[in-house]
Image (tube, rainbow, N blue to C red):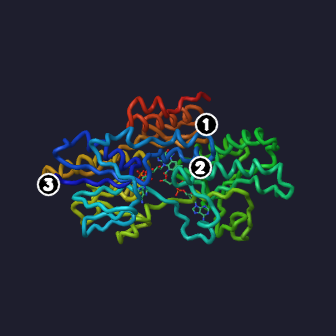
Amino acid sequence: SNKPKIVVLGAGYAGLTTTRRLVKTLSPEQAEIVLVNKHNYHYESTWLHEVAAGTINPNQARVMISDVVNPNRVRLVYDSVVEIKKDEQRVVLENSELSYDYLVVGLGFESNDFGIKGMAENAFAIEDIDSSREISEHIEYQFAKYNNDQNAEDHSLNILVGGAGFTGIELVGELANKVPELCKKYDIDRSKVRIINVEAAPSILPMFDKELVAYAKKSLEDRGVEIKIGAAISECTPEGFVVGDDKELIKAGTIIWTGGVKGSSVLGKSGFELTKGKVNVDGDLRMKGEENVFVIGDCSWVWNKEADRPYPPTAQLAMQEADVVAANLKALISNQPLTDFVFNDKGTVASLGHSDGIGNIFSGYKIQGKSAATMKKVVDNRSLLLLGGPKLVLKKGKFRPF
Ligand code: FAD
Ligand code: NAD
């Protein structure tokens, strides 16, 4: 047919939202829509620290794509993208190939270890369901074998987390809840377990003001998390992190890197020009110099003109970008002018385990404690509502009381 073909890569917040918007705004006669994703499910990346700590079941954090996208309307291709050949308007998948008229790249993030020696080989990272589930299973195994292993070393129960940005802090918050449960289950004294969060910068969570940072730090320390600031990790060995100028080796049976993320490695393999691992896009979210390629979510940098720096990549940003991309695709197809993306910042909330948190909402209003934890659950349920309506919220939503 001569209908234009729109191919969306990735069913994360960016790609899935784009696809659902396209279905709403375009008639089946106006365009063919194809959605490509590695798995037949979408996952809530923003819940992965809970999967990694073992405080939620991995299935709660994932949604079958065919439950939220009509397969009769959108062609669903479950395969891995290997390379994008934009000069040929083709996408190479592991098992096939696709051509496109319009492309939306929403392949998301990967862990970034900045080439630190031994990190890739020796540390876990939170990247998707499989890698996060492996962490919780590994931790539980350390506990399960401890009392039954004559040679078990005390540090085998230690959990080391490298990087105290959002992901690191939210992870140790969950671990602070999970470790006492595991101690009880496996008859282990809580004092045998250390949760250690190592951060190079002089503060944890630099995006929050001092008061909220102090609150978060105290909440975590009160629950037995050790926070080491101003401690750069220079190497990861099979035993632990090498930290600081004096090259102290901190040992642990579980080593997790949460020190940063970058865009999908497909971007580099496709020869795209990258800034810190991501593609710079124009105001209308198209790759610079390209007519028909949009790059959104954690694969791109979108400039915040007011602050003169890129927006920090978040799920909130990715979903809002998706709305603009869908509208711009419709405009392109019908020869209308494109619109520029404007971010509507609804605020930020970080959880500190199940019943605590900190946040900045409604431009500048600070929250902490149970109200922040409640707000975080509202945000999580809202994300499900946007992706799959009230039915999905009832099925996967967060309602467990404190
Ligand atoms: P992703 O969510 O990474 O989705 C990418 C999709 O593409 C996935 O479905 C993946 O399977 C698929 N894919 C990847 N590679 C391929 C390939 N080669 N072939 C085929 N398919 C592929 N942001 C917030 O706003 N609020 C939060 O509270 C928050 N909490 C977070 C907590 C954690 C633990 C983490 C790690 C991140 C958090 N973030 C949060 C950031 C947020 O998760 C990301 O900004 C967001 O996921 C980006 O969305 P995306 O659609 O670009 O990518
Ligand atoms: P990040 O880049 O925000 O934080 C990484 C941290 O690791 C930084 O504090 C950095 O100083 C530290 N670090 C880096 N190298 C180090 C080293 N060698 N030694 C010690 N420390 C080191 O990464 P992230 O926390 O994975 O977050 C990624 C993105 O996801 C961000 O844009 C964030 O806003 C978003 N996110 C948001 C939320 C939320 O809104 N609740 C939660 C998680 C993630």
Q: Amino acid at mark 2?
A: Arg
Q: Which mark, residue 133?
A: 2
Q: Secondary structure at mark 2?
A: helix
Q: Which mark, residue 2?
A: 3
Q: Amino acid at mark 1?
A: His
Q: Give percent across and percent down for residue 265.
A: 44, 65
| Neighbourhood count class around disc 2 (C-alpha, 10 Å): few under 14, some 14–19, many 20 upward | many
Is the C terminus in the top left, top right, bottom left or bottom right quadrant?
top right
- 377 left or right of 32 in image: right
Compared with 358, 244 (above or below) is below
In the image shown, does 96 or 205 lie closer to the viewer?
96
Q: Residue at x 53, y 33 (%)?
A: 398
Q: Give percent across and percent down for residue 338.
A: 20, 52
Beta carbon of the mark 1 residue lies under 8 A of ligand 2? no
Q: Secondary structure at mark 3?
A: loop
Q: Which mark, residue 28?
A: none
| Neighbourhood count class around disc 1 (C-alpha, 10 Å): few under 14, some 14–19, many 20 upward | many
| Neighbourhood count class around disc 3 (C-alpha, 10 Å): few under 14, some 14–19, many 20 upward | few
In the image shown, does 40 or 157 lie closer to the viewer?
40
Q: Which residue is mark 1?
A: 354
Q: Give percent across and percent down for residue 244.
A: 69, 67
Q: Secondary structure at mark 1?
A: loop
Quarter holding residue 88: bottom left
Q: Give percent across and percent down for residue 143.
A: 75, 48
Which one is earlier in the sequence, the residue at label 1 or at label 3? 3
Which one is earlier in the sequence, the residue at label 3 or at label 2? 3
Determine the residue located farthest toward the front in the rendered image. Answer: 95
